[in-house]
Image (spheres, rainbow, N blue to C red):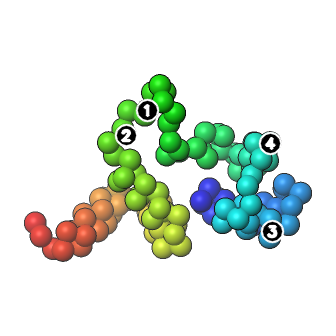
C-alpha cells in the first residue's frame, strides 16, 4: 500500500532493493516470505517505520493491546479498502481537494449515499 501511495512501481522498488520486480510481486502477494533484514531495507526505502508492517498483528499473551482494539474490525475494513485500486484513487483525488468546505460536502455526500439516503 505504501509503495502505491507514493507512486513507486514494483520495478523501482526492486531496483532500490537489488531485486527483480517479480520478486517484489511475490513479496507483496505473500508467495515468498520476507526476512527481517529485507523488511528493514524495505521500510527504509519506503521511508516508513518498521512498525508499519505490523499494524493489526496479533498481540502475544501478556502484552498490552492498542487502546482501540474494539475498533479493529472497522480499521481493518478501512485499510483493506484503501489498498484497493478504487480506494487508492479515491484517496489521491480527495487529497488534492484543498477547499475544506468542498471536502466536508463530499464526506457528507458519501455518508448519505452509504446510508441509502436515510437521514
Q: Please give the residue where the numbered disc 3 appears in the rendered image.
A: 21
Q: Where is residue 100 in the image (x, y as percent from the top left)?
A: 35, 55
Measure how far apart labels 3 and 4 are at the Cα level. Answer: 18 Å
Q: Label 2 near label 3: C-beta < 8 Å?
A: no
Q: Name the side, left or right, on which 6 lies relative to 95.
A: right
The residue under the point 85% across, 66% down is: 20
| Rendered residue at 50%/36% (across/down) | 59
Q: Of marks 3 and 2, which one's residue comes earlier in the chain? A: 3
Residue 98: where, in percent of width, then height? 43, 59
Quarter-of-image position of residue 81: bottom left
Residue under the image location 35 percent in, 61 percent down = 103
- Looking at the rendered image, the quarter that the C terminus falls into is bottom left
Q: Is residue 91 visible?
A: no
* Residue under numbered circle 4: 37
Label for residue 65? 1
First of labels 3, 4 by sequence position: 3
* Residue ID for mark 2: 69
Location of residue 15 in the rendering, given as x and y in whole percent from the top left corner: 86, 61
Amino acid at each position: 500500500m505504501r509503495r502505491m501511495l507514493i507512486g513507486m512501481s514494483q520495478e523501482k522498488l526492486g531496483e532500490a532493493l537489488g531485486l527483480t520486480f517479480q520478486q517484489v510481486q511475490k513479496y507483496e502477494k505473500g508467495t515468498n516470505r520476507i526476512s527481517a533484514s529485507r523488511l528493514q531495507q524495505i521500510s527504509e526505502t519506503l521511508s516508513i517505520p518498521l512498525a508499519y508492517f505490523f499494524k493489526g498483528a496479533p498481540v502475544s499473551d501478556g502484552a498490552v493491546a492498542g487502546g482501540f482494539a474494539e475498533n479493529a474490525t472497522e480499521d481493518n475494513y478501512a485499510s483493506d479498502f484503501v489498498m484497493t485500486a478504487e480506494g487508492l484513487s479515491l484517496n489521491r483525488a480527495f487529497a488534492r481537494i484543498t477547499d475544506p468546505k468542498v471536502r466536508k460536502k463530499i464526506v457528507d455526500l458519501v455518508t448519505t449515499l452509504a446510508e441509502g439516503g436515510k437521514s
